[in-house]
Amino acid sequence: MKFAYRFSNLLGAVYRQGNLSFSKDGNSVISPVGNRVSVFDLKNNTSETLPISTTKNISCVGLSPDGNLAIIVDEDGAALLVSLITRAILHHFHFHKPVSSIRFSPDGRKFVVTKDNVALMYHAPGKQREFNAFVLDKSYYGPYDETTCIDWTDDSKCFAVGSKDMSTWVFGAERWANLIYYSLGGHKDVIVGCFFEKDSLDLYTVSQDGTLCVWESDTEPDGLVLTKKSKPKAPSPTEEDDEDTEEERTEGQEGEVIRGKAEAPKDKQTKNVRFKQRSKHFFNKERDFNNLTAAAYHKPTHILVTGFASGIFHLHELPEFNLIHSLSISDQRISSVSINSTGDWIGFGCSGMGQLLVWEWQSESYVFKQQGHFNNMASLAYSPDGQYVATGGDDGKVKVWNTNSGLCFVTFTEHTSSITNVTFTSSGFVIVSASLDGTVRAFDLHRYRNFRTFTSPRPAQFSSLAVDASGELVSAGAQDSFEIFLWSMQTGRLLEVLGGHEGPVSCLCFSPVQSILASASWDRTIRLWDMLNSWQVKETLSLTSDALSVTYRPDGQELAVATLNSEIIFWNPQTATQTGSISGRHDLEMGRKETDKITAKHSAKGKSFTSLCYSADGESILAGGQSKFVCIYNIREQMLMKKFEISCNLSFDAMEEFLDRRKMTEFGSLALVDEGAGDGDGVNISLPGVRRGDMSSRHFKPEIRVTSLRFSPTGRSWAATTTEGLLIYSLDSTLVFDPYDLDLDVTPASIHKQLQLKDWTSAIVLAFRLNEKALKQEVLESVPHDQIQVVCSTLPDIYVEKLLGFVAACLEKTAHLQFYMTWAQSLLMLHGQKLKNRSGAILPTLQALQKSIQRHFDDLSKLCDFNKYNIRYAVALSKQRGMKRAAEDEGGEEEEEEEDEELSEEMSEASIDGADMIL
């Protein structure tokens, strides 16, 4: 159970590239984030990352009309068929070439994929279990350049495909006699979007230079005539199409091939469908820098949304092209636009800044506004109750995330350079951050402001940070002057400058139980500074290599140090003696970068762990560094227990141990060849020595690495800041069957028998020995409310902690608040003294309990306040009405009204008292 952690959520990034999609009900946004997919629930304000991942960054996502299936395609053309209900992968498929767009037909029976200059129509996977879920129906050739966009008619009879050759092609999904294909021109730039009008063949096309063409058809959709069943002989493929046909044959697919020409097909028997250009409109070119990047159209409301490279978007009503409004939402290009089913909400994705916005255009307000760190994350910290995570990035921003919702609720932008470290104070309401801009800042989570700024006498770049257990002392280490600075949190004054290190201070850590500061440096020493004895050096621990990270065990009785030679060394801080060491060189398993001249095996000799973190119980330690693996070690046995692969995304550099020999030529690796300079990308070569991105190159592959690791104080999850984002791994209790003190008599039948006999204590003990969650919950909820205190008093001591942990876990999601609160209160009141003696071991359980109670308190307090104010308003209203009636009526009626008023006052006071009691 201790190591049954699995990936649960991705924070710190909300959008990278690809197309945004709304769910069928329009209340959720589906956003591709790297090689994963996140679903943002706009009604409940929560986020969830699907437990699937592709081998490269996702380029497009297609949703079925019923919202149950999604086809996810990555940059190489590898596709996954995913069920959005079970969150499971149903089928793998490979298109062999990059796919630009994918779209299901409105009836859900077909879907079209565009790659290169061809549109492929497949039969949509059905509800039956099929050997091959993707069956090719037809291949449509016509455009001479890459295809860019797709749109279907409402009756699924035809679809349109836009291309980079400035043409738009209309194809029939069936063999219509009067419409096989039709080519539309009229543009002078790449087609960004093509959209059919509702229940019509009329078409709108939008190009990159800001031009809108309105096309009118002379035939209604009902006027399409189906041709006879004689299957036409496909023309012989040309030489340039041989590759495509070979690939299709290798997939075992057979489909009809339709080849369009630049002129309409000639047919003497039936009158062919004709299109004519009804009007042509132009967007404001000067203001929008002549570059339209994304477009979406909502057919029922006739609303066209266009996004531009300058971050501006326009809303127009078609076909009159009336401007409703325009707004600037970013200073980067808008990469994707999507409209929900009702037409009220518009989703925007900006890949340059990692922004995801949902705009309600009628009220002109934001429904959802999130932005991740648009550069690398450098550090993270959990709040003491585990509810919040603070992250600092190279973009100079400090963001605070709610672990329950997965969303960022406050961003601090006061720093002007990269953040190197963040931490919470013991109260949980103050975040302290260190930066390379020469300041350490303290932020208040009550008022969301920067209330303290600590600086050094001479400018220094702070690379490490620590706050003591009381929250009064703030220390930061400089990487250029080799000094440690101490400030007072209350006054903001500099207390002392600690000198003595002969190299940059890489890490600082305060003891959780004593006023002792441990500092790690590149001078191969760990120094322990006594804060109570004039900040003198208490001990100096000598190492065999440069120290990169240092951390205390939660009980303060052990110190772990990561060194440059890939070792983790454990010390007793009381006696200054070494208690053990772990060599992790072979566990890192470095990958080889595309620009490396040496193999991964040799480059791993210079790599090491850069971040360490103890588990909440102090029995194991997490270690991560310049690798895609996070290792968890058992300290007592000094052995590797498990390795977590944080990413399988080959879009990152240094992911594979060996370079792909198929890309190697006599001139070097093909991966380093500049292919896409015209599209705004560029060469993949970064400047020598650059680690965190290269501002000189237009495009670079980020290197996979783990910059920071933290265990949640509740012990049920841990987090890692990586190149991919902030990854949360949670304890999954359903993965492992882990009985405790199992015997032949411990069976579900014997547990149910004890319940029938109403022997509650025996039933609880047997259920915890079998250790099945559903059975434990059933037994616990079978106990009568008035018997809880009696059962708790007779429970054996060894099961008290287990029951308290289970109550804390159930309390997080249950609706039976009072029932489980009674269990928690009875356990703590009756066994409080015994639990206090084991406070170190039981601390994670208590913090998990506190987190659950605090969350319910926050939710209920808002509801009770709302009800309380409503009741007061109703009472005041009834008094006013009573006074009016009293003025109008006379005699005995006045006495009856007074009695009614007194009765209403008594009822309102009782309800207010009830609300206060809940609070």
Image: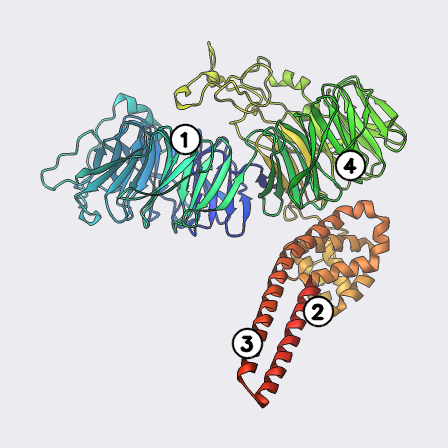
Q: Secondary structure at mark 4?
A: loop
Q: Secondary structure at mark 3?
A: helix
The quadrant in which residue 559 appears is top right
Q: Which mark is residue 881?
A: 3
The residue at 44%/39% (across/down) is 348
- Can you identify the residue that label 1 sits on? 309
- Can you identify the residue that label 4 sits on? 491
CB atoms at circles 3 and 4 under 8 Å apart?
no
The amino acid at mark 2 is: Gln
Q: Residues within 10 Å of mark 3 (few under 14, many from 20)?
A: few
Q: Residues within 10 Å of mark 4 (few under 14, many from 20)?
A: few
Residue 625 visible somewhere in the drawing? yes
The quadrant in which residue 283 appears is top left
Whole-angstrom CA distance, mark 1 to mark 4, is: 47 Å
The numbered mark, 3 or 4, whose residue comes first in the sequence reads 4
- Can you identify the residue that label 2 sits on? 756
Whole-angstrom CA distance, mark 2 to mark 4, is: 64 Å
